[in-house]
Each structure stands twice: as C-alpha cells, then as structure tokens.
Amino acid sequence: MKILSVAIPCYNSEAYMRKCIESLLPGGEDVEILVIDDGSKDNTADIADEYAREYPGIVKAIHQENGGHGEAVNTGIKNATGLYFKVVDSDDWVDVHAFTEILANLKELVGGPDTVDMLISNFIYDKVGVRHKKVMRYRSSFPQKQIFTWDEVHKLRKGQYILMHSVIYRTNLLRECGLVLPKHTFYVDNLFIFQPLPWVKKMYYMDVNFYHYFIGREDQSVNEEVMIRRLDQQIRVNKIMIDFMAGQKITNKKLKKYMLNYLDIIMTVSSIMALRSGTDENFEKKQELWQYLRQSDYPLYLKLRTGLLGRAMNLPGKSGRQVSVAAYKVTRKFFGFN
C-alpha cells in the first residue's frame, strides 16, 4: 500500500502543473500522484499522460468531464489507494525537505493505535511581489511530533485557521464521514477541511514549512475581483457549512469553538465580498445569508451576529458599509483572506 496519495486537480494547468508534479516526485514509491484532468482544453491531459508513462509506479493520469475543483477532489478520494490523502493544487508546490520528513513520520505512524486521522504542517503564502512571505504556523497551538487529541489543543487565534494546505487526512476517514464536494463550485476547500473535523480524533503536528500556496494569478479564485464575481458560489459553500454545523452535535468544546470560529471567518468573507462589490443586489445577498443562518440555527446566529466580526459586517447604513470595508482592509493581511 502507498503511504500517501496526492490528488492534483488540473484545469487548463499546462503553464504551471509541471512544477507541482516535480515537487512531489521525490516521494518515490511511497507516494501515489493522481493528476486529475478536469476536462481541460489545453495540453494538461497530454502532460498528465506524459508523467504517467515516465513514472508508471508513481503517477496516474485520470481524465474526466469538467466538474470543477470539488469533483476533481471527489475523484481523487475515490481512486486513492494510499493510507493518507493530500490535495495539492496544480499552481502550488511542496518543499522537498519537508516532504521527505513528513513521509518518514507518516511511515512511523502507520498501523495500530499510532495511525492518526490528520497530520498538520505549516504552509507559506507565496504571494507574488511580496518579499517576506507569510507562514501559517501552529507551534503555539498544537503539541509537536506527538499524537494528540482536541483536548490537548491550545488556543487557536481567530486568524490561525487550518486550511487545505495544512492538512493530510487519513484516506478512509474521508470516506467514512461521507465527504462529497459539490460540482462546479469554487471555494469547496473550506468544506474539505470543515466537514471531516468531527471524525478527527487523533492528530499529529509537524512544525515544517511544507506547502507553498501560490497567490498572484489574475484569474485565481482568491483574487478579490474574481471572488466578487463568484459571490454566489462563495455563499453556496457558506450555506452548506451552516447546514452542517446546525445538524451536528459536537460535544468536544475545543473542537466546537474552532468550528464556530471557522464559520465566523467564512461568514465574514462572504459578507465583505458582497459589500466590496458596492451593488445593492449583492448587499441583499449578504442580508439573505445572515437571515439563512438565523432560520437554520438561531443560537448559532446570535453567537456569530453579536461577535466582533458579526457586528463589524452588519453596521447600519451606507456609512456602516464603508466602515466595514475599512475594517476589512486593515485585517485582511492578518486573516489571509486573499
């Protein structure tokens, strides 16, 4: 059995996917690289096939009709044979030294009571034009190089959230929790992290800078103008998170608090993108989203609406909207929205 399956969702990725694949090849036979061509119209499919021919025991090319990022991740989960599962976007890459260290630790954790549900590592915001790259670390929150549970987690700051870039999941956990991401929808990486969390019991943190999260393409989903254009998809993901949270009975206090904070962040992102657009139509969508939360889970609504971010996103009048946007500009670097 492979130790780690890595899914690379690709759509028209010919310009940068080679760097991503090459960064993963040093994993050798311990790694299965699933290059998922999501109906690309450029040379992505040919590049995927080229690597599959050259590294037949490591790289597998999978071709499918276009279904979006989420459907490519779904395909990766279905086809993965590794004990653990990681998603690396085609414009991102990993550090080879950290990768080698992570694989060595995963080998030690395989089997019996030492098999963990989630391995966490640091990631780098590799933003174009920024000299000093921001690194998301968790050394103040998680015990290092030991198995731990939610009870042993220290305080996670509001902006210190776990993203897809931080996480390696146990593959069968993703299947056991029934994770299926929606088709033709961006921002599903939030669901990929959020929904499996109640099934995570044992964790392991390595303080290594593993994942390079590239930010800088004009057509990138986290580009602010793109996020505003795709506001409906952001809100769709936000509502799925609300439904999930409302339907779960989470007994662990630390896990529940973290998931509430995560939902708080996503509500803020959805709200601020609606406000940044400056249109009455999108302002109404923001209002409807908060009403949806109110109707879905009133106690949850009260908790988020009366919190610092909830109040900042719902100031009255046009001047209130301007204040909300100003507050967003001040805090976005800290929270890493885009």
Image (cartoon, rainbow, N blue to C red):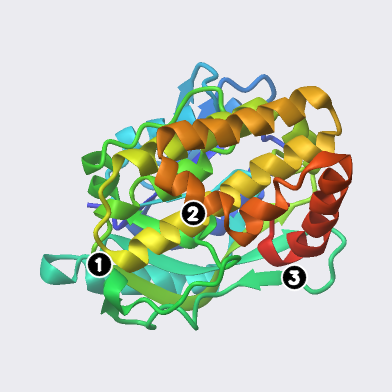
Q: Nearer the viewer, mark 3 or mark 2?
A: 2
| Horizontal side of residue 113 vs 249, given as left or right | left
Q: Image quadrant of residue 212?
A: bottom right
Q: Image quadrant of residue 39?
A: top right
- Badge 2 density bin: few <14, some 14–19, many ≥20, Cα 10 Å: few
Badge 1 amino acid: Lys
Badge 3 is on which residue?
Answer: 133
Q: Residue at x 84, y 71 (%)?
A: 131
Badge 1 is on which residue?
Answer: 202
- In the rendered image, the vertical position of residue 53 relative to residue 87, given as above or below: above
Badge 3 element: loop
* N-terminal-most mark, 1 or 2: 1
Q: Nearer the viewer, mark 1 or mark 2?
A: 2
Viewer can see residue 257: yes
Badge 2 element: helix
Badge 2 is on which residue?
Answer: 303
| Horizontal side of residue 206 vs 289, given as left or right | left
Badge 1 element: loop
Query: Measured from the top left, where is residue 47 in percent x and y?
Result: 60, 34
Query: Measured from the top left, where is residue 145 in percent x and y?
Result: 35, 82
Q: CA distance from mark 1 to mark 3?
A: 30 Å
Q: Nearer the viewer, residue 270 or 18?
A: 270
Q: Image quadrant of residue 247?
A: top left
Q: Residue at x 25, y 42 (%)?
A: 177
Q: Residue at x 74, y 40 (%)?
A: 273
Badge 3 amino acid: Lys
